Each structure stands twice: as structure tokens, then as C-alpha cells.
Image (spheres, rainbow, N blue to C red):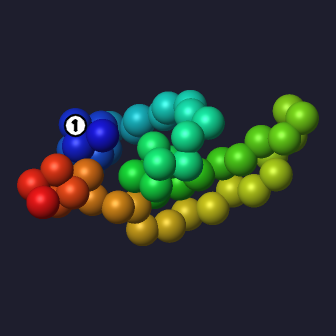
Amino acid sequence: MALLQSLNRAGQTVVFVTHEAEVARFASRVVRFRDGRVERDERRAPEDAVALAAA
């Protein structure tokens, strides 16, 4: 996750798909789908994977 966040901060677009809330907490934008439709699209401050790994 730290590598993906680093790439994103450098200007690269990173898209990944997960069913795990623990993984999604590192994303700055989460789009939730239900039955093929967007249910929710939220932007938020992600947890910092680098800081978490250093702890």
C-alpha cells in the first residue's frame, strides 16, 4: 500500500478493486457499487501506509 500511495502522490493514477475495508482505508477515494450501480462515491483523507509501516 505504501508503494501505491507513493506512486499516487507522484501523480500516477492508481485504481484497485477490493472487498476489504482494511485495504480501502488507504484510498483517498472510494466508490461503492451495488448491483452494477454506483451506490456511494466518497473522497476522504486516507491513512498513511508509510507511517503505519514505520510504527
Disc 1 is placed on an element classified as helix
Which kind of residue does numbered mark 1 sit on?
Answer: Leu
Seen at 63% across and 62% down, the residue is: 42
Density class for disc 1 (Cα within 10 Å; few <14, some 14-19, many ≥20) is few
Give the labeled residue for mark 1: 3
Can you give x and y, in whole percent of width and height, for residue 25 in the image? Answer: 46, 55
Can you give x and y, in whole percent of width and height, for residue 8 in the image? Answer: 31, 44
Can residue 31 be seen here? The reply is yes
Seen at 69% across and 56% down, the residue is: 41
Seen at 66% across and 48% down, the residue is: 31
Quadrant housing the C terminus: bottom left
Seen at 42% across and 68% down, the residue is: 45
Q: How many marks?
A: 1
| Residue at the right extreme of this rendering | 35
Q: Is residue 27 above or below residue 43?
A: above
Q: Is residue 20 above or below residue 53?
A: above
Can you give x and y, in whole percent of width and height, for residue 10 in the image? Answer: 22, 45
Instruction: Identify the image quadrant of residue 43.
Output: bottom right
Quadrant housing the N terminus: top left
| Residue at the left extreme of this rendering | 54
Nearer to us in this view, 44 or 9: 44
Can residue 7 be seen here? The reply is no
Can you give x and y, in whole percent of width and height, for residue 6 in the image? Answer: 21, 44
Nearer to us in this view, 23 or 9: 23
Nearer to us in this view, 8 or 54: 54
Q: Is residue 17 above or below residue 43?
A: above
Instruction: Identify the image quadrant of residue 52.
Output: bottom left
| Residue at the front extreme of this rendering | 55
